[in-house]
Image (cartoon, rainbow, N blue to C red):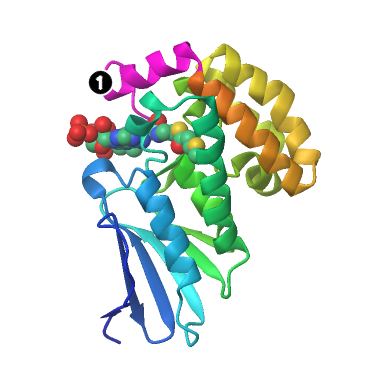
Amino acid sequence: MPAEPLAMTLPASLAAERQGTVAILRLKRPEKRNALNDEAILGIETFFTSLPDDVSAVLLVGEGEHFSAGLDLSELEERDVTQGIAHSGLWHRAFGKIQFGKVPTVAVLHGAVVGGGLELAAAAHVRVAERSAYYALPEGSRGIYVGGGGSVRLPRLIGVARMMDMMIAGNAPLTNFAVMQALPRIAEMDPAAGYAVEALMSAIAQADPQAKARLTDFLEKRAPKVTR
Ligand code: 1HE
């Protein structure tokens, strides 16, 4: 069945099409490994709130060699705590439209599924992994904390212990505090309370000078990439 474009106004980093009753949302910024900036997150929200009534399911896919490298780290350099709280709230709202949307979403995972990319996948109803897929939460090594609902959704999928293991190796003081003190408590909270605490924790962590330094290190190619 041929794909047809879906009539929606989306940023250039996303593309929407349909094949019969299946809508496909494609992360389309392969040159930046589908890193998710504010524009893309707002576009994801637009897509899930503008689906035509005759769509019965959504496929969420990434173009290029990776599903998604997560948060666009270049945006974090300028953000203070207040902006960080609002930013996390934006992700929570957009991903809530996936989880509590009109139709089931299947995330098709390949290559790097990391950080906010894994948080995005966690908001889908079904995850299908190709053999190339690998998972990481590099927030730990960047000195930040998940802010896209990961501490609410991922413990329910993979458990607190596994998530701690994925984040603690970076040995960043604020991330370690978040992972040891906030994560296990958020995992036991009502999701609404969990999102609020996650927003606070991620905003505080990303505003710390040490986190900013680690982000600059990544952007200036002094910090390691995620490896399989
Ligand atoms: C990026 C990003 C990004 C790539 N933000 N620009 N996420 C991370 O810490 C993952 C960081 N990325 C990587 O570890 C690697 O890029 C990958 C393993 C995903 C892919 O490696 P590779 O060799 O295929 O690509 P690359 O050469 O590293 O990246 C290509 C370009 O994309 C390069 O830019 P260029 O201008 O030099 O070409 C990279 O800088 C850029 N790029 N990833 C910005 N993430 C709601 S809170 C969520 C918190 C998080 O998600 S933290 C996790 C962030």
Disc 1 C-beta below 8 A from ligand 1: yes
**Residue beneath the point at 63% across and 30% down:** 200
Q: Is residue 83 left or right of residue 74?
A: right
Q: Is residue 30 left or right of residue 47?
A: left
Find out whether residue 177 is within the magenta segment: no
Q: Quadrant of residue 126?
A: bottom right
Most foreground residue, 95 or 166: 95
What is the three-letter code of the residue carrying label 1? Lys
Q: Using the image, determine if residue 102 lies above or below residue 34.
A: below
Extent of the magenta region:
208-226
Most foreground residue, 47 or 224: 47
Q: Using the image, determine if residue 94 lies above or below residue 207.
A: below
Is residue 144 visible to us here? no
Give the quarter the ligand 1 occupies: top left
Q: How many marks?
A: 1
The residue carrying mark 1 is 221
**Residue beneath the point at 31% across and 67% down:** 9
Q: Is residue 177 left or right of residue 43?
A: right
Q: Using the image, determine if residue 228 lies above or below residue 156.
A: above
Q: Using the image, determine if residue 94 lies above or below residue 182.
A: below
Q: Secondary structure at mark 1?
A: loop
* Rendering coords of residue 49 (x, y %): 50, 69
**Residue beneath the point at 38% across and 13% down:** 213
* Rendering coords of residue 189 (x, y %): 80, 41
Find out whether residue 222 is within the magenta segment: yes
* Rendering coords of residue 212 (x, y %): 41, 18
Locate the C terminus by quadrant.
Answer: top left
Is residue 1 visible to us here? yes
Q: Quadrant of residue 125?
A: bottom right
